[in-house]
Image (spheres, rainbow, N blue to C red):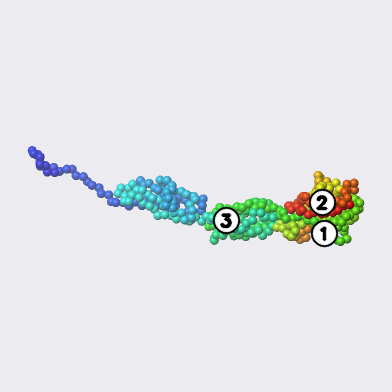
Amino acid sequence: MTTSATCTTAPTATSSGITMTVNAVVTPSVSISITTGANPTCTGNALTFTATPTNGGTPSYQWKLNGGNVGTNSTTYSNSSLADGSVISCVMTSTATCASPTTATSSGITITNNTPAQPTFTTSSTSVALGQTGVVYTVSNVSGVSYAWSYSGSGATITGAPSNSVTIDFSTSATSGNLSVTPSYLGCTGTARVIAITAAASNESNVVDNTPSYSSTTPEFNINPDYINFIDATSTTTGKMIPMKLKIQDGGNDLTDADKLNTILTGIKFTVRDHLAANQLAQIKTAILTTSAGTVIATASKVGTELVFTGMSGTNVTAVDVENAGSGERIIHLRVSFEETQVIDNTKLVFQVSGVNSWQQQFYICSSRWRRCSI
């Protein structure tokens, strides 16, 4: 410096020197890698991503999942539910001297998740009959995926796994349960699809009036019979008790149902009314069920306004399923005698089934009527 001041001893002065340090510009960068787990992965397997900075100083981190912010300001980020195709990346903010720019974004890691999607049923039955076979269950098919099938009930045989379509045979003793199908692909197991299946006997069996099939030589009591000839309750021969024929039909009128169970009639009830629907049970002395040959199967009790047969079993009341090499039907006879002190002249009696019980089968109650006259 040169001064213009007066009376200076020296007109110039020199300052102390400053030594300058010039730092080179640095470019920050960050890379990420999977340090726990592997890619490809399965849902439920934890993946840990670790960031490695360059020229970061004391950096801060923002993790990204498909471009959205996730995680915390940490060198690591973990996730166990990444969907297939997810992209993980990290943005680092550098505090290094002369960093330009101050932020850096890593390359993304694209996730391959081999876990198959939960299957959807396209063919299924939630109700099956005992003994029903060949029931098909199908889920939507995905190439390369295998399917594990299981049934929580008993008596079900599954054929066709590990394909997406199976056939199940239900035994006559099968129980209700849940059918599960679980997908897997390249070591990954997906979420199972479950449906509840109810296994029960068919409800198609019935009891019908078969009286018109009597031969022409057997009395058809739509005429006026002499009641006095039908008061002997100790004999089952024609002329002692009025016969009416019933048919037990396994599988209903077409003798076809889904199960392979025989129908066993264990109980049946009848009302006895006149044509005005008035109760006429008092006119009946005895009522029995017999075979066509006359063997007594059961004797009725009078309960309220009904003739009630209970406790029956065995071949004589069993209609053998056609799938068990049977005819699907069984003929039985209702035979009644009159109470001579209660008979009302010229009364038309109507015998109507009012209830039925069976073993292993549910019955439709048939409303068939048997109209007979007494004098």
Sequence-wise first label, 1 or 3: 3
Indicate the quadrant where residue 127 lies. Answer: bottom right
* Residue 324 appears in the rendering: no
Q: Secondary structure at mark 1?
A: helix
Q: Is residue 279 visible?
A: yes
**Residue indicated by mark 2:** 275
List x then y, in percent, for residue 307: 82, 48
For the residues bearing labels 1 and 3, Cβ distance under 8 angstroms: no
Give the quarter of the image for residue 107: bottom left
Q: CA distance from mark 1 to mark 3?
A: 53 Å
Residue 312 image point, x, y percent: 80, 50
Residue at image point 87% right, 51% down: 346
Q: Residue at x 8, y 39 (%)?
A: 6
Amino acid carrying label 3: it is Thr
Which residue is label 3 attached to? 120
Q: Nearer the viewer, residue 302 or 271?
A: 271
> Which is nearer the N-term, disc 1 or disc 2?
1
Of discs 2 and 3, which sits in the foreground?
2
* Nearer to the camera, 37 or 88: 88
| Residue to which mark 1 is pinned | 212
- In the picture, the disc for residue 313 is none
Give the camera-side residue of 368 and 182: 368
Is 341 on the left-hand or right-hand side of 124?
Answer: right
Is mark 1 in CB contact (under 8 Å) with mark 2? no
